[in-house]
Amino acid sequence: MTNSDQFDNNLQNDIVSKKEKFDELHFFLDESGQFTEKSDINLVGGVLLFGLYDGKVQNGIRRAITNALKKINGQYPQDLHFYAFRESAEEMRQAKEQKKLLCNSLHHELENWRKQENVKIYGILIRHRQDIYSETSGILNEKEVDNRYIAMLWSLIEHSVFVNKKVISRLNDNAKIHLHIANRMFVFPKDEAKREYLQSLGWQVSDDTRGEDNQYAVTTIINEDELRGMFRVALSDRWQMSKLELGEVDIQRLRYNNVRRETESTTALYLADLLLGVERSRIIRYNQIIVQPTLPILEQLDYSPHLKFITNCKSQLLSGGIESVLSNLEDNPIDPNDSGTDDLIPLLVEYYTHSPKTFHRLFMKASQFVDQPNYRQQGLDILKLLEFVYQKTGQRDLLSELYSILIPFSVANHSGDTEAANELWERYLELENQLPALGNEAGLTMQAEFRCRRAVSLTDQFQFEKAEQILVDIGTKAEQFQEKMAEIFETTVEQLNRRPLGMCYSTLAQACAFQANDFDKRTLAESLFRNALNCFTEPDDQERIWVYLAHLACDFPEELRSLWEEAHVNFLQYTGNIIDGIEKPFVLAAYIKGMYVFGNINEKRQWANDLNQILVDYSNDLLNRHPFGLILQMTAMLNVSVFNETGESEYKKNANVFFSKAVQSLASGEKLLKTLASAAQLRSVLFALETDANNAGKLELLQNTIRSVAKKLSIVPTSDNPIEQANQLLSNIRFNYW
């Protein structure tokens, strides 16, 4: 264990083991960095002292500093900046060694003093990582004047006294907070326009008195009244429940030469300056000189939008605004393992314990997110947070447990991970008989969600009859869904929640559509889809049914052209931009297929041209998500169709390109998508055999691919001709699998 590790352990033991609370907290804060460049290491921080700061404490700090300075024959305070620029390399080397000796000596002096006098004094700092107000115009923007410094200073103070449990746990409710700040000077090249602008905002601008003739300076960035105002506004607007009081506030310029008067706070500010210098060198490992920390660092914060988010969440939770917090978490789900969430998680656990229903909405949102390719990871991040908080409650909540199975179950279906789907289904079955306890709406919805997703999982394994049976299990036939569900949930048909019924009709219709090789199944599939449509009121649900009906129509172009035309009209009703594959990928997939099956040559050419241009701009990450593999395949088939009708070589070239991309995209998925990748490969090889004179190796590739697809589909081709075998296999890939 290193000395630094031992130091950190001592700090943790000190914080955890002591129950003593204090009536006063003193900040002694300085800064390090230019604050005009985000790439620079910009720090604000210094010394945090719990308890009374009096002459005894001041003398202890001064004695530690002067004793350390003696080790390098330095004078207090002028030699605290001894490591300024030296002219020769040897002088620089000596200065670096002196710095190391001073810092390590000061570390030991302060550590001995802290232990002997039982002084609760620590280091604290905030490091700039990312601007919070960078998109804001006007005076809030961090680029304006010295706002980056001011914003970091206030963020450190606010988070420390209102959010950070390491600080809050040591303070009595009505403790006084004292702020001692080293004055910062903001300098800028002489620019009359900027000078006038700053003066119009109330800044006092003068010539730089440090000998820089070409610079102006704002000698006081923030004053005592402004700090008091910020604290007062925070108490009234954000932390109304807090009983903390603001005590002394002083801002002073640190001088190291010709010091006329040293106040009590000046001594601790010297220490704050030293501490930041040490932490800066430890961050950048300046010339590999590693020094001991000046004081135990109680907290190092990162200044970023995440810090603002955590602070806002805590403020809202304390004021009873749990709904606002959950809305924020929808857009910015936090990582529960992030140390910056230590103060927020316990509050979420407390709310969850008393009102789990409040969090069910967030579970529902996560469930919706994972069904959308562009938001899937966001949904999983929300689930990770909710599961973490739920486990911390130590209680049992059936609906939370069901969502914790349902969401990954949905992800497994979307990715084609049938093994994971099978395991999650078994976990659900252990809980299904408890669903009536949730009541009509929640219980029925959950049963429909799980059974529908299980049916989808089985269709992904080409077990269509089993998929159908999963849904018919709750009624002897489709028409008895409503009666059976009403019986299970002890209600009437009229009072049933219609959306779960629609989900069941829709999923049962899909199972029938995959088996629609005769009139009865095809007719039943269409009828069930229309039943589902009548149950849904939300545009997204209705749009999804029209997508399914479009796929069904494409499987029977001669019989169901009118159905495609009806779906086409309704696509226009529910989508403002058909071609937008990012927002409506499943609509786009169905629409391309419709153009391929029902479009004339002019429509096909136009769509092929548009897609050839649009899809090349999509990222590989997006194209590897379902259903973009199928979109790429349909684009290839559209190009094949145009080439076959026109003979134009560019469409042949594009077809080969998109077949290759489709195979790559589908093959990156799980089991089902890999099967569909083999089918895309079949189509690609068939096209090559039809169009290329040089077929060397193509026939062997075709035969190998046929064997692979036949095995995955559990189908034995009846023909001896490889091309007929390939077409027979492809005819078994129906509905929305092509």
Image (cartoon, rainbow, N blue to C red):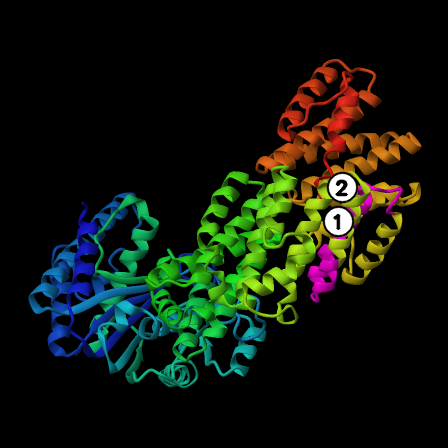
Instruction: Find residue 72 and report its horizontal and vertical position in percent.
Output: 15, 55
Residue 581 seen anywhere in this rendered image of the structure: no
Category of crowding for the residue at label 2, using alpha-carbon neighbours closer than 10 angstroms: few (below 14), some (14–19), many (at least 20): many
Which residue ends up furthest to the left in the rendered image?
Answer: 116
From which residue to which does the magenta span run?
531-560
Is 678 rendered above or below residue 358?
above
**Front residue of this view, candidates 181 and 296:** 296
Three-letter amino acid code at the position of disc 1: Ala
* Number of marks present in the image shown: 2
The N terminus lies in quadrant: top left
Residue type at numbered disc 2: Ala
Magenta-colored stretch includes residue 176: no
Task: Please state if 547 lies on the left or on the right of 85 as rendered.
Answer: right
Res 247 quadrant in image: bottom left
Q: Is residue 179 above or below residue 124?
A: below
Q: Quadrant of the C terminus?
A: top right
- State the predominant SS element of the stretch in magenta: helix
Image quadrant in which you'd find residue 664: top right
Q: Which residue is mark 2?
A: 516
User: Is residue 664 visible to the viewer in this orientation of the structure?
Assistant: yes
Please give the label number shown on residue 525. Answer: 1
Say whether residue 345 is left or right of residue 96. right
Asked if 495 appears above or below 509 in the picture, the reply is below
* Residue situated in front as seen by the camera: 671 or 54: 671
Looking at the picture, how far across and down is residue 496, in whole percent?
62, 68
Task: Choose the circle earlier in sequence order: 2 or 1.
Answer: 2
Q: Is residue 539 magenta?
A: yes
Q: Are marks 2 and 1 in contact (CB under 8 Å)?
A: yes
Q: Locate residue 490 relative to residue 129 in the image: left or right.
A: right
